[in-house]
Image: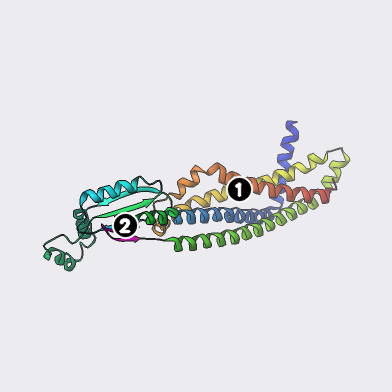
Amino acid sequence: MFSSFFRIIKFAFQNFYRNFWLAIVTITILVVTLFSITALIILNVISTQAVKSIEDKIDISIYFKTEAEDIQIIKTRSELLSLKEVKEVNLIDREQAMVFFKERHKDDPTILESVEILKENPFNSVLVVKAKNSEYYPEILKVLDKEEYNQIIEKKDFSDHKIIINKISIIKTKIEKIGLFVIAFFALIAALIVFNTVRIAIYTHRSEIKIMKLVGASNWFIRAPFLVEEFFYAIISFLILIAVFYPAIDFLQPHLNYFLEYDFDLISYFKANFALIFGLEFLTIIIINALSSFVAMKKYLKA
């Protein structure tokens, strides 16, 4: 049994080296197919994080009138926090608003001087409301439209980024459709190349195969070296992908954080989901190779 196994491995390596350049082409196409799948996953993750980054910026800023008393502001905050739609409510009092304003304009002395000239603090207290979900903001705004709130609220500033989110979602959908087409295209090319690789290998060894059949070798024993050879292709393609992928992600990471304005570690994401993502990719390549090899062998070995 072990001798048969080692013979199969030996024949597989012989097939690999005898068709070396064809093997290189096959591996290249398999790598491109794997990279297309991985690129689609990356784009999906980035678009999801982009939406999340924008959603985190959505809030309602409630500016109170100067005559609003502290107890009224605190009561409003408590009532908003009691709503199931509300995630958090941050209070920025008049003093904090002044500090934030000066910090934001610290490099503009003209503006700072104009503030210093004023005898009183020109800023009013502000409540910054964040919802648990971006869909909840209209409901919160309805609550704030009550007469009791209108008496103390000067204005409500709702930074709605729904249009941007919808655009990102549309782009994401289009990218996924194009990505699936590209993956299917390269998968088909990979299947055809594997098919032809096996066919050429069988044609090259046709005399040996006839002799093996004459001496009673089973079809499985004849098929096995070609299947093992395709498994080599899958392993090598997968290792090349891993070798290229992580340096590429490391290069992309700072640009990604700048684009998203959001601290998201893409490398950690792929490490955490390594088995699922790359396991499925490897399985996909194995299935493509196995099906292509089976069809080629069935046709030319007439099993």
What are the residue bounds of the magenta stretch?
148-157
Describe residue 104's horizontal placement relative to residue 299 as left or right: left
* N-term mark: 2 or 1: 2
Q: CA distance from mark 2 to mark 1?
A: 59 Å
Amino acid under label 2?
Glu
Q: Secondary structure at mark 1?
A: helix
Q: Secondary structure at mark 2?
A: helix
| Of labels 2 and 1, the one closer to you | 2
Residue 286 visible, this angle: yes
| Most foreground residue, 181 or 165 | 165
Residue found 56% across the figure and 53% down from its top: 38
| Most foreground residue, 245 or 188 | 188
- The residue lying furthest to the front in this view is 147
Residue found 52% across the figure and 56% down from its top: 43
Residue 242: numbered disc: none
Residue under label 2? 147
Amino acid under label 1?
Glu
Q: Position of residue 87 (x, y in %)?
A: 37, 47
Q: Position of residue 236 (x, y in %)?
A: 61, 48
Q: Residues within 10 Å of mark 1 (few under 14, many from 20)?
A: some
Q: Position of residue 23 (x, y in %)?
A: 67, 53
Q: Residues within 10 Å of mark 2 (few under 14, many from 20)?
A: few
In the displayed structure, would residue 119 be above or below residue 219?
below
Residue 281: numbered disc: 1
Q: How is the image coloured?
A: rainbow
